[in-house]
Image (tube, grey):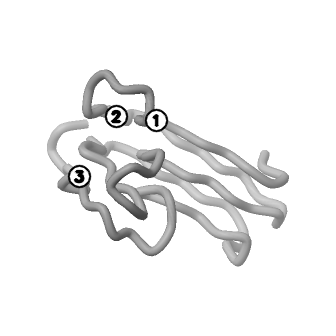
Amino acid sequence: PGNSIIDGQNGTALPMAGLVRTTSNTNGSVKFEGFTIQNAGGTTPSAIRFAIHLKGDDPGLYEFSDLEIVGRGSGGMDYGIYMEGTLT
């Protein structure tokens, strides 16, 4: 991590939760490796913020490795990974 940075710049108008995300339309396996993810934004200024939001119902392997997730600090509305649906 560190060489490639995904920076949400604490944005407040993301179309969906999650700076990095998969959707229910994601087909097959997902591999995400070697990134720093920081300053995850939200859909509104007071929204819960997720660095990675995984939503899926298709078969496949979701593999995440060698990641650094940097939060915004205290406040209780800043999460690293959120998963929903049927994931493997």
Going from the N terminus, do you reach mark 3 or mark 2 first? 3
Query: Within 10 Å of the Cα at label 1, are there few (<14), some (14-19), or many (20+) other Cα atoms?
Result: some
Which x, y percent locates residue 15? Answer: 45, 74
- Which one is nearer the viewer's eye here, 5 or 82? 82
Q: Is residue 73 above or below residue 54?
A: above
Residue appearing at x 37%, y 36% in the figure: 67
Which x, y percent locates residue 76? Answer: 43, 27
Residue 38 occupies which quadrant of the picture? top left
**Could you tell me if the residues under marks 1 and 2 are in contact, i.e. CB atoms within 8 Å?**
yes
Residue appearing at x 30%, y 32% in the figure: 71
Q: Tell me the distance, in whole angstroms, between the alpha carbons under discs 1 and 3.
A: 14 Å
Residue appearing at x 41%, y 46% in the figure: 51
Number of the front mark, 1 or 3: 3
Identify residue type, mark 3: Asn
Report the residue marked by disc 2: 69
| Element carrying mark 2 | strand
Query: Within 10 Å of the Cα at label 3, are there few (<14), some (14-19), or many (20+) other Cα atoms?
Result: some
Q: Is residue 31 above or below residue 58?
A: above
- Which one is nearer the viewer's eye here, 37 or 42? 42
Identify residue type, mark 2: Ile
Which label is found at residue 31? none
Report the residue marked by disc 3: 10
Going from the N terminus, do you reach mark 1 or mark 3 first? 3
Report the residue marked by disc 1: 80
| Element carrying mark 1 | strand
Residue 2 occupies which quadrant of the picture? top left
Which x, y percent locates residue 56? Answer: 74, 62
Judge from the rendering whether residue 46 lies leftward or rightward of residue 85; answer left or right.
left
